[in-house]
Amino acid sequence: MKKVYTIAQHVITGLGHGVEEHFDKMSQHSTGVQLHHNPSVVPEAFTAALIEEPYDFTSQRTRFEHYLIECVRKAMASAGLDAKDPSTLLIISTTKGNIDLMDGNYAGVDSSRLEFSEMAGFIQKQLKLEHEPIVVSNACISGVLSILWAKRYIERGQYKHVVVAGGDIVSKFTISGFQSFMALSDAPCKPFDANRNGLNLGEGFAALVLSSDKNDKSTEIVGGASSNDANHISGPSRTGDGLAIAIDKTLEGTSGIDFISAHGTATPFNDAMEAKAIELCGLQHVPVNSYKGYIGHTLGAAGVIETVLTIHGMEKNLMPGTLGFETLGVAPKIKVQANFQKGAFNAALKTASGFGGCNAAILIRKEGTCI
């Protein structure tokens, strides 16, 4: 089967625009997570990472569509792709898409675009794509799962290029939903820390171009797998078995990895489960980070955004730290990194877990290295 390379990317979150800006700010311990007072979203104050830019709500596009299209266009331009090329496919990763259409904020947008199929058709027309995009919506593993799907399409020769675009916004619906689970922290989150008490939501968008071709900055998507622990509709497995299955399948035939980009939401149960899965796979000695303290939990976009940031770190021989982490607060003695680390990071594992017991992982390798 064909090898699958990453050849271009773009990212937008509450921390900034573009990968370089994200790394500059992360290296200075900056965060997009802030306290917000916005009664039009929810009556009480909430802590989240929002993209705070003026937006014309009379536009023919929603905020979700606007930022997703911007990411895709910039990534495709960087890769030199023609939108009308029949060998190119777009996969959209999201949990809620145009969910704020429910709030009646848009005067010029058809409410039918709440439906993923209608939203995908609109984006196809805006970008003048040959094929209608595929939408992957599988809770918080959507981004990692979309990359895995893209890899399979390219390996089998169905497409030469696949653009994976992840996006989600913070809305009344998402905040109230996580409030009902008592999962939100009123302060910046602390992944894997002893004093963690919940997650921060984040708005975010990213586009990652995968291809059977490679360029001078390519990394390779070597493997990947998904699983379901069949534990509970909203609670992760207490044993970590489900995620461990996905990790073990992903790492089959490899001799080792240099770091793990964890899901790391900072909720008590998710972090404990993920640490157990890492231990079950014998990876407790491998450095671990979480990006959630910088950008919040971006839901269906998280796997794409965090993969983009991980790839950029590998290119620069840097592993970002875990903002908010101070004291290990999970039983397995995993190696959570608080600060940026320099090193030859040639192979990285990206993990994700989500509602319904879903889990996914992918293995990323720097081109020209062996693992």
Image (tube, rainbow, N blue to C red):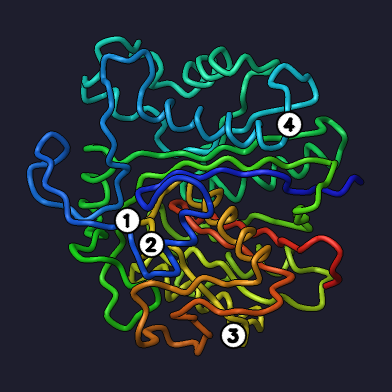
**Mark 4: which secondary structure?**
loop
User: Could you tell me residue 215's position as x and y percent?
Assistant: 81, 47
**Mark 3: which secondary structure?**
loop
Measure how far apart labels 4 and 2 are at the Cα level: 30 Å
Q: Compare marks 3 and 1 and give the one earlier in the sequence.
A: 1
Q: Compare marks 4 and 3 and give the one earlier in the sequence.
A: 4
3 or 1: mark nearer the eye: 1
Q: Quadrant of residue 103?
A: top left
Q: Compare marks 1 and 2 and give the one earlier in the sequence.
A: 1
Name the residue at 42% across, 57% down.
Answer: 232
Measure how far apart labels 2 and 3 are at the Cα level: 24 Å
Measure how far apart labels 4 and 1 are at the Cα level: 31 Å
| Amino acid marked by disc 3 | Gln
Asked if marks 4 and 2 touch (Cβ < 8 Å), the reply is no
| Amino acid marked by disc 1 | Gly
Asked if marks 1 and 2 touch (Cβ < 8 Å), the reply is yes
| Amino acid marked by disc 4 | Gly
Asked if marks 3 and 1 touch (Cβ < 8 Å), the reply is no
4 or 3: mark nearer the eye: 4
- Read off the residue under disc 3: 284
Using the rendered image of the protein, determine whether residue 228 is visible from the camera's viewpoint. no
- Read off the residue under disc 4: 80
**Mark 1: which secondary structure?**
loop
User: Could you tell me residue 55's position as x and y percent?
Assistant: 28, 27
The 10 Å Cα crowd at callout 4, few under 14, some 14 to 19, many 20 or more, is few
Q: Quadrant of residue 264?
A: bottom left
- Read off the residue under disc 2: 294
